[in-house]
Image: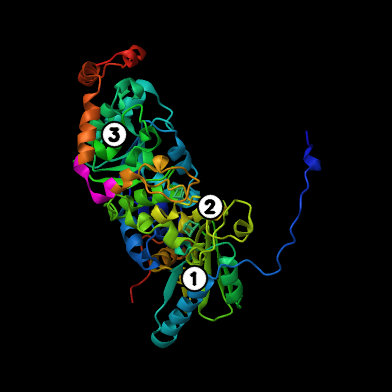
């Protein structure tokens, strides 16, 4: 019987051309139109990349073409989220991961600032109360701040 | 107990905040939920508003003639911090594979959940129902048919998970030795969602439950009762190898030049053109890949009678029963069902129905 090491194995050299099924191109055009809307009407757009039928290499091709800009933000809630501006100002990548560092959503947001970055109104109201309680622990009334 | 009550009456927004999840965290949760439900990102604010107020629905999960693959699939759904939050917010009151209780205690939990949530609970079913002899598949001595009928009676809706519950699946494959039928062959007076697949994609199962939790309603369905958002387009229409199909570039064997170059797998038996499922976009295993991306054609596992479609490696042939169903010849199916039901061991079934009498091993040998 032939031994395992007797079976000839031919290792094929890795192709230098990166694999890409050209599915990134229509997304890049969608981003172009979204940027146009943002520039002229101030209207933001979100594209969910989970809904796109990417083949091997397509996602890398898209992210490579978009490149890396000057802002990178890390969010730590229900696992990490990494948000970065691409080389095209106003085009952001939002990579949401869960506590096990598995990706739960990958989106492109074309906006002046991604919606999730803004402090949320209810959280601001709560932190106002919290800080006030810390500074004035003996105050009796529930909200010590005057309504303007 | 008081804690249990609180969990039951709390809205999802309240329980997340109690766990220290910020509004940003909630927004992230809603974004991932929208993505999981295959809804556009513009729906996130509406989802956030609805989830903020959502209350825990009770879910009773019944497993009949199945291989437990569907439960294996859902327990591997890949975003624990999001889907677990959804599951924490669903009261899974009965699932005999996952629950600790067994026998009478388990059945008591099922009956209590049915009683307390009359008219509001969801019944999830995996597995087909054998009609030839109730003894072929029983739980605590109760036949699958009887358990299904009595459990769905007070349900708001039924979710048939997997191709067995949705269309009969493997047990229903020729020659169908147990007289297996689907949930919709038996239940006619409740809304039914068919989440087909062998097994279904985990996020598609949770996506349907999340839809009910979020909007309190069922998603829009196709002609076979499947949610349009996941089953609205064929594998072929969303396949990244489609440009090769259109150019007539096919792999002829699994190791030829075409296979290495990632050409279309049609001639190797790919059933993508007749199969409706979300594999090409949602993918499997944390979104890593899916069968066609791994170099194997689609088997058509989310379609009725895919086991009898003429060989996984033969170039496409559409199963006859699929054509019958799509043409809406429901009457023929109704007659077949009647015949199968007639073949039941009537005396045993009637007795068992009257008193929950245990079906014994001897009953398997009896003829009607
Ligand atoms: S591999 Fe299958 S689904 Fe993809 S294009 Fe070919 S036939 Fe269609
Ligand atoms: S690719 Fe086809 S056979 Fe494979 S899981 Fe998806 S629908 Fe089922």
In this rendering, would B236 be left or right of A21?
A: left
Q: Nearer the viewer, residue B326 or B73?
A: B326
Residue B6 in view of the camera:
no
Q: How far apart are the two marked residues, 2 and 1, measured between alpha carbons?
A: 19 Å
User: Is residue A69 shown above or below B30?
Assistant: below
What color scheme is it?
A: rainbow
Q: How far apart are the two marked residues, 3 and 1, measured between alpha carbons?
A: 43 Å
Image point (20%, 37%), residue name: B334
What residue is pinned by disc 1? A108
What residue is pinned by disc 3? B113
Quadrant location of the C terminus of chain B?
top left
Q: Secondary structure at mark 3?
A: helix
Q: Is residue A18 magenta?
A: no
Q: Which residues are magenta?
A: B324-331
Q: How far apart are the two marked residues, 3 and 2, measured between alpha carbons?
A: 33 Å
What residue is pinned by disc 2? B286
Crowding around mark 1 (Cα neighbors within 10 Å: few <14, some 14 to 19, many 20+) is many
Q: Secondary structure at mark 1?
A: strand
User: Residue B233: x percent and y percent?
Assistant: 38, 59
Crowding around mark 2 (Cα neighbors within 10 Å: few <14, some 14 to 19, many 20+) is some
Q: Residue furthest top?
A: B362
Q: Is residue B329 magenta?
A: yes
In this rendering, would B160 be left or right of A70?
A: left
Q: Nearer the viewer, residue B286 or A22?
A: A22
Mark 3 or mark 2: name the one nearer the start of the chain: 3
């Amino acid at each position: 019987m032939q031994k395992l090491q007797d079976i000839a194995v031919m290792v094929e050299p890795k192709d230098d051309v990166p694999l890409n099924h050209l599915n990134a191109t229509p997304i890049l055009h969608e981003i172009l139109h979204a940027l146009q809307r943002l520039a002229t009407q101030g209207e933001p757009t979100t594209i969910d990349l989970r809904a796109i039928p990417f083949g091997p290499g397509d996602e890398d091709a898209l992210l490579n073409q978009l490149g890396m800009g000057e802002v990178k933000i890390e969010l730590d809630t229900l696992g990490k989220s990494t948000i970065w501006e691409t080389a095209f100002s106003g085009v952001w990548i939002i990579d949401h991961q869960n506590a096990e560092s598995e990706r739960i959503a990958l989106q492109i947001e074309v906006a002046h600032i991604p919606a999730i970055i803004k402090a949320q109104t209810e959280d601001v109201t709560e932190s106002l109360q919290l800080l006030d309680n810390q500074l004035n622990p003996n105050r009796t009334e529930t909200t010590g701040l005057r309504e303007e | 107990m008081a804690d249990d009550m609180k969990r039951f009456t709390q809205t999802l927004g309240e329980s997340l905040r109690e766990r220290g999840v910020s509004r940003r965290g909630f927004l992230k949760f809603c974004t991932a939920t929208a993505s999981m439900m295959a809804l556009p990102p513009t729906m996130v604010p509406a989802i956030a508003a609805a989830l903020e107020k959502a209350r825990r629905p009770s879910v009773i999960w019944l497993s009949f003639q199945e291989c437990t693959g569907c439960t294996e699939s859902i327990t591997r759904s890949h975003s624990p911090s999001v889907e677990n939050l959804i599951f924490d917010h669903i009261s899974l009151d009965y699932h005999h594979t996952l629950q600790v209780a067994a026998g009478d205690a388990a059945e008591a939990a099922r009956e209590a959940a049915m009683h307390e949530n009359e008219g509001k609970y969801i019944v999830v079913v995996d597995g087909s129902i054998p009609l030839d002899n109730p003894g072929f598949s029983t739980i605590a001595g109760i036949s699958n048919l009887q358990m299904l009928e009595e459990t769905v009676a007070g349900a708001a809706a039924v979710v048939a998970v997997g191709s067995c519950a949705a269309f009969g699946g493997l047990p229903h494959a020729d020659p169908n030795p147990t007289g297996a039928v689907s949930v919709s062959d038996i239940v006619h007076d409740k809304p039914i969602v068919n989440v087909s697949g062998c097994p279904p994609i985990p996020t598609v199962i949770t996506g349907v439950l999340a839809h009910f939790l979020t909007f309190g309603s069922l998603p829009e369905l196709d002609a076979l009762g499947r949610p349009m958002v996941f089953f609205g387009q064929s594998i072929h229409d969303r396949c990244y190898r489609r440009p090769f199909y259109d150019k007539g570039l096919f792999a002829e064997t699994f190791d030829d030049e075409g296979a290495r170059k990632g050409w279309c797998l049609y001639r190797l038996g790919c059933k993508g053109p007749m199969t409706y499922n979300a594999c090409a976009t949602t993918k499997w295993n944390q979104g890593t890949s899916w069968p066609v991306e791994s170099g194997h054609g689609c088997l058509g596992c989310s379609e009725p009678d895919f086991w009898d479609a003429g060989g996984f490696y033969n170039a496409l042939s559409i199963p006859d029963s699929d054509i019958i169903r799509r043409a809406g010849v429901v009457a023929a199916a109704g007659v077949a069902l009647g015949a199968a039901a007639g073949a039941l061991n009537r005396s045993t079934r009637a007795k068992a129905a009257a008193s929950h009498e245990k079906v014994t091993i001897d009953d398997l040998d009896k003829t009607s």
